[in-house]
Amino acid sequence: MVALFRELQPIDGYRIRLSQPFSNYDRQLLTLFYQPLIGSEAMSLFMTLWADAEQVEEREYNHYHLMNLLTMPLAPIFEARISLEAIGLMRTYVKTEGDVRTFLYELSPPLDAKAFFEDPLLSTFLFSKIGEQAYRNLRSRFTIANAELDEFKEVSRTFLDVYKPVTHRIDIDEGDKHAVIGRRNAEGVPFEQDEFDFNLLRSGLSEQMVPQAALASVSKELISKLAFLYSLTPLDMQKVVMMALDEKLELPEARLRKAAADFYKMNTSKTPPVLQKTFTQPPTPTVEQKEMTREEELIYYLENTAPIDMLRDLNGKEPLPVDVQLAERLVNTHELPVGVVNVLLQFVFIRNDGKITNNYVERIASHWMNKKVSNAREALEFSRKEHDKYMQWKNEEKKPATYNRKPVREGMVPEWFYKKEQQEKSEEHVAPETEKKQKESTEDNADIEERRRKLRERLSRRSKGVN
């Protein structure tokens, strides 16, 4: 299992680049051909990046921006990204400068319909996802009927029929080293073919039975993809090649693909093969995670949840825009880790009767930044250790503002009035006030731990599928 925090963090920046301008035809191919293969989350990620990349000015974002746009935690965003990379729709580059990591996401166009159906991996994968009838309907939708063209004769002119060559020399400035953006052919699925033993394949095929020219006419990539898709060894592929030869001892690619599929049906299964991902980020805790304590489950939740989702879970409804903006400012401007922001917002929400005030939050945030609090565990420890101090700050926030008033002439009020008032206040409030503060501190600590306990229980029930 890949450690997510090593691969990607919410604070990591990213920029987007289109390898070439995309068209409406590309959008159709993405929706109809690729979406069944990569899923809705990867499709949403691609379309979001595409929309951001078409801005006039190139901008840099961080991944917390993506978490908010897609309303997804970081783990499924990362899984969606590697799905796009594997299918050939994205290339990812990274640059690290000190502690700052920046990604460059280059979006690639999809294969056109012809190339897609000729690719054995993609076409079989799509067939297994949508079924035979839907697959045939989709194929016929992108098939051009050429039968009626047989009744016509082409009379189109060529370039030389219309234009004459230039008779005088024109100096062309070739000093500009900047590359000109042009339409590139889609490269398709990035596929390594080193694992297939081509020498063993050739050694079992005699020149009399299979001419070397026939075998050389088929790309190594196609042979490797067919072997991977149908789990064929070099010895199995020898039999497939023999089955695919035509009467002229030639090896057309279409016959090779059909022979591989027939061999699979005869020896393995009647149903088409299904591709499985080698990496998946589980939506629920793994076996090791299920053995964690409730405290560790809470920390795991706080570290891997976007603040907007944490506020939604905590409050049971959509958070206010002002609270969302505050969370974004803490992450984007002050660069606090997401886990620390979650603990901070949770603490203030619980201690301040469901209200999140900017000044109070930013005062605690400043304290944690000075103390270099870097994760949810440290933030939880600070919220408990410095609880009394933070509650004192909260009470200071609630004190009414004092205004400058015109002094009243003291001669109008006798001196005994002040002495009596001060004595009464001293008798009535000194002892109860001390008692009240001690009681509030004890009750506050107990209450915040109780609220956190209930949140942990709710998260634990959700992970087990219980509402």
Image (cartoon, grey):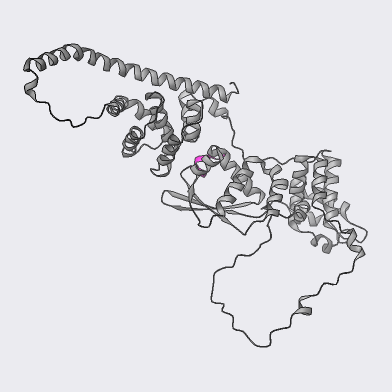
Query: What residue lies at 80% left-to-right and 42% top-to-bottom?
Result: 134
Q: 71 or 9, which lies in front?
A: 71
**Image quarter (top left, top right, bottom left or bottom right) of the N terminus:** top right
User: Is residue 6 one of those drawn in magenta?
Assistant: yes
Q: 285 or 355, which lies in front?
A: 355
Residue 370 lies, in percent from the top left, at 31, 39
Q: 249 or 306, which lies in front?
A: 306
Q: Quadrant of residue 464?
A: top right
Examine the rendered structure and indicate whether residue 415 appears above or below residue 382: above
Q: Is residue 300 visible?
A: no
**Image quarter (top left, top right, bottom left or bottom right) of the C terminus:** top right
User: Is residue 181 one of those drawn in magenta?
Assistant: no
Q: 274 or 317, which lies in front?
A: 317
Which range of residues does the magenta coloring cover? Answer: 1-10
Residue 63 lies, in percent from the top left, at 50, 44
Residue 390 lies, in percent from the top left, at 31, 28
Residue 353 lies, in percent from the top left, at 39, 23
Q: Quadrant of residue 402?
A: top left
Q: Describe residue 305's horizontal placement relative to residue 247 as left or right.
A: left
